[in-house]
Image: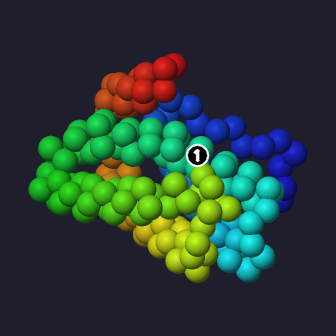
Amino acid sequence: MTHPFPEVAPDFSQPLALLRACHQRIRKHAGFAVELTQQLHQQGHSAALQQAANQVYRYFSSAGQHHHADEEQDLFPILAGRSPELAEQVRILLAQHQQLDSLWAQLAPQLQDLGRVQDSAALLALSQQLAEGYAQHIRLEEDGLLCQAEQQLSQDALHQLGQRMAARRGL
């Protein structure tokens, strides 16, 4: 059944739900990156394609960076100290963040100026790696760490987490 009103997005009072909502947007923008690089490879550069690339670039350069910081600076340290198992999950997720950041560092400058891309097939492969990497990372994080966080963090800890996330964005 289709609802007449869109679902209300979580806010900083629900930090774990907000992180999950960010994951949906990350998947969406990573998928856009694949679509636009595929189109670049098949049809060449266009102004509309550059505009789409600019949107992906802006998202990952701002909201995507905040999301990683939310996890790395606030959520992960809280959970890593709770058990050796959670510490190992955090270690794996941090390593994945480094890999994703490396892929983004390669992709970002090319998205800023698609007209200068010399190897569109390589750019397409890079965007596919980023999308697949995020899909795997998000699955691991949501099925493991966020479920543990929901069970283990007190309302006070969640409130503090939400406040730090909001402060990071100047809110």
Q: Residues within 10 Å of mark 1 (few under 14, many from 20)?
A: some
Q: Which residue is at the far left?
A: 84
Quarter holding residue 106: bottom left
Q: Is residue 113 left or right of residue 76?
A: right
Q: Which residue is mark 1?
A: 59
Above or below, comparing residue 41 to residue 107 in the picture: below
Q: Which residue is at the far top?
A: 171
Query: Considering depth in this image, is 151 or 85 the residue closer to the camera?
Result: 85
Q: Residue 133, position in %: x, y?
A: 44, 68
Query: Considering depth in this image, is 4 or 135 the residue closer to the camera?
Result: 135
Query: Considering depth in this image, is 149 or 75 the residue closer to the camera?
Result: 75
**Quadrant of the rendering where the N terminus is positioned:** bottom right
Q: Residue at x 52, y 39 (%)?
A: 62
Q: Residue at x 74, y 66 (%)?
A: 45
Query: Considering depth in this image, is 97 or 139 the residue closer to the camera?
Result: 97
Q: Is residue 24 left or right of residue 4?
A: left
Quarter holding residue 152: top left
Task: Give the residue type at disc 1.
Answer: Tyr
In this orientation, does residue 142 appear? no
Q: Residue 48, position in %: x, y?
A: 80, 57
In this orientation, does residue 55 appear? yes
Q: Residue at x 68, y 77 (%)?
A: 41
Quarter holding residue 74: top left
Q: Is residue 35 left or right of residue 13?
A: right
Q: How is the image coloured?
A: rainbow
